[in-house]
């Protein structure tokens, strides 16, 4: 037996074990070729990637160290006695091999794979093999089967007595597109329940949870979130505690570095989480633009049809809005700046970003029409009434108060640089991807005050030397990286 040691190492979503090269209980070489080890005791077991260390101060020869995620998943106290066994490859991986060879998988076969992935029985290489095989081809039936399997592998919320449960989701790729933080209070003010669980940003400068955390606590347990929705009709929280479609989080952690983002996996990812969250009525926002995820109308229509097909068979009432994704939405890119834009819209500030306001009203109006009491075509008018009357702001203030204060006060980054126009003319295009990269290099979303404040949008005139946008950062290193990247290519095209 070895003594269990908790190592304060965040290995994100990967279980990692650390064994001393001079281990007194096992021959380390027996596990090195496998690359993984199974830790067992007291009816519990855990598969982990094996790292070998030489420093006994990290792990002694009679210890096994586990990283934060692994220690939490195993659920034993530090100092417990455990033993090691060579890991048994998951039986479902033979199905992955079949998929690589061109086979179409049944619902039961996909469920077996997803169960093993959720139980951390797959290495990242094995997950990558599954993702690449699915990216090569997936039938519509497989997309539906994968979605069902991902729903079944996690928690599923139920909202007894609330009737219609509305939700919205944007497929992403457009900086500043924080419409959820305006849509939720509008819909809640109308009285339609809209529990919005969001993820934190992975590759973007801010997710809804990151931006909402500027204003309120988003890290709520499931029971408190459900009570909040019953009281305020809405919430804007991080979904990490709820364990909705946990396989999706694991798959995403491998997809991102591989730049795998197929429409089939996108649909399964989004719909599995929405059904697991208990949504009955869902609006999907698909922005289309030259630097967005979806580049043209024909791609958007194909994606819409797939959403509708899978959503219908899952029992969802689903609508799709195809929106303008040609440039960032609003003026701010980064949590503090985006929160500023959101609150300006909710406060009916005359200087608020008009594009963010109108887009949010469009989407909120579509959702309000899920309510049978709202006539078709009158949703936008109702959304506008709720915003202009101050009812939406009051609903947002109530949600903020019930969620509680944020963990820390976030302020705008004090290091500021302006990126100037190289010529007289008009802004002809804004590169969403490039601007998002610059904002991330400035420190967003980890540094909530970092990002980009856009001073010119497409179609607006500018003179040579006038600022196109401001970069905000909190540290010299981030500030230098962002400035250098912007100097190579500002992401803004100006034509005379």
Image (spheres, rainbow, N blue to C red):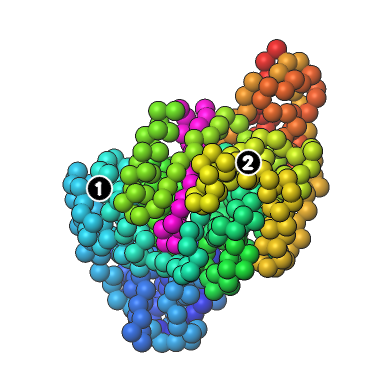
Residue 275 included in the magenta stretch of the image:
yes
Residue 361 included in the magenta stretch of the image:
no
Q: Position of residue 156 (x, y in %)?
A: 41, 66
Give the number of the disc on residue 141: 1
Picture quadrant of residue 33? bottom left
Q: Which residues are magenta?
A: 274-296
* Residue at image mark 2: 381
- Per the image, label 1 sits on a secondary structure element best described as helix
Q: Position of residue 149 (x, y in %)?
A: 31, 59
Disc tally is 2
Query: Whole-Å distance between the Cαs marked 2 and 1?
Result: 39 Å
| Viewer-proximal residue among 147 and 84 | 147
State whether residue 306 is above or below residue 456.
Answer: below
Give the number of the disc on residue 163: none
Picture quadrant of residue 446? bottom right
State whether residue 392 is above or below residue 221.
Answer: above
Q: Is residue 50 visible?
A: no
Q: Is residue 242 visible?
A: yes
Q: Position of residue 346 (x, y in %)?
A: 72, 48
* Quadrant housing the C terminus: top right
| Viewer-proximal residue among 452 and 395 | 395
Q: Position of residue 398 (x, y in %)?
A: 70, 63
| Viewer-proximal residue among 92 and 214 | 214
Q: In the image, what residue occupies the spot 47% across and 75% down?
A: 71
State whether residue 9 is above or below residue 384.
Answer: below
Sequence-earlier tag: 2 or 1: 1
The residue carrying pointer 1 sits among few (fewer than 14), some (14 to 19) or many (20 or more) residues within 10 Å by Cα, namely: some
The residue carrying pointer 2 sits among few (fewer than 14), some (14 to 19) or many (20 or more) residues within 10 Å by Cα, namely: few
| Viewer-proximal residue among 420 and 334 | 334
* Quadrant housing the N terminus: bottom left
Tag 2 near tag 1, CB within 8 Å: no
């Amino acid at each position: 037996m070895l003594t269990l040691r908790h190592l304060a190492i965040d290995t994100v979503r990967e279980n990692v074990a650390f064994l001393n090269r001079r281990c007194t209980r096992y021959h380390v070489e027996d596990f090195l070729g496998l690359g993984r080890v199974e830790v067992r005791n007291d009816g519990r077991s855990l598969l982990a990637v094996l790292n070998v260390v030489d420093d006994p101060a990290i792990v002694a020869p009679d210890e096994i160290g586990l990283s934060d995620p692994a220690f939490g998943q195993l659920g034993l106290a530090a100092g417990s006695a455990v033993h090691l066994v060579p890991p048994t490859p998951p039986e479902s991986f033979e199905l992955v091999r079949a998929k690589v060879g061109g086979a179409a998988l049944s619902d039961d076969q996909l469920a077996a794979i997803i169960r093993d992935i959720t139980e951390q029985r797959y290495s990242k290489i094995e997950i990558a093999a599954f993702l690449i095989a699915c990216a090569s081809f997936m039938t519509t039936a497989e997309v539906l089967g994968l979605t069902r399997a991902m729903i079944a592998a996690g928690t599923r919320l139920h909202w007894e007595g609330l009737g219609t449960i509305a939700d919205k989701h944007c497929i992403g790729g457009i900086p500043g597109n924080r419409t959820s933080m305006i849509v939720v209070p509008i819909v809640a003010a109308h009285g339609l329940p809209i529990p919005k669980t969001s993820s934190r940003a992975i590759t973007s400068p801010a997710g809804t949870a990151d931006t909402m955390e500027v204003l309120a606590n988003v890290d709520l347990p499931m029971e408190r979130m459900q009570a909040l929705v019953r009281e305020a009709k809405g919430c804007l929280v991080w979904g990490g505690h709820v364990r909705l479609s946990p396989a999706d989080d694991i798959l995403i952690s491998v997809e991102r570095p591989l730049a795998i983002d197929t429409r089939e996996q996108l649909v399964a990812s989004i719909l599995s989480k929405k059904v697991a969250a208990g949504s009955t009525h869902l609006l999907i926002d698909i922005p289309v633009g030259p630097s967005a995820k979806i580049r043209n109308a024909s791609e958007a229509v194909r994606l819409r049809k797939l959403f509708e097909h899978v959503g219908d068979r899952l029992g969802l009432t689903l609508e799709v809005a195809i929106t303008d994704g040609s440039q960032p939405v609003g003026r701010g890119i980064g949590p503090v700046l985006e929160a500023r834009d959101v609150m300006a819209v909710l406060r009916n500030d005359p200087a608020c970003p008009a594009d963010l306001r109108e887009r949010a009203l469009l989407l909120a109006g579509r959702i309000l029409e899920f309510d049978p009491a709202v006539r078709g075509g009158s949703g936008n008018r109702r959304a506008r009434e709720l915003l202009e009357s101050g009812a939406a702001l009051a609903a947002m203030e109530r949600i903020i108060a019930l969620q509680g204060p944020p963990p820390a006060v976030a302020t705008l980054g004090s290091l500021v640089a302006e990126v100037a126009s190289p010529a007289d003319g008009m802004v002809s295009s804004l590169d969403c991807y490039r601007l998002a990269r610059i904002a991330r290099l400035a420190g967003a979303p980890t540094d909530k005050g970092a990002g980009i404040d856009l001073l010119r949008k497409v179609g607006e005139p500018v003179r040579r030397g006038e600022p196109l946008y401001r970069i905000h950062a909190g540290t010299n290193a981030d500030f230098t990286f962002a400035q250098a990247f912007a100097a190579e290519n500002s992401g803004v095209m100006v034509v005379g």
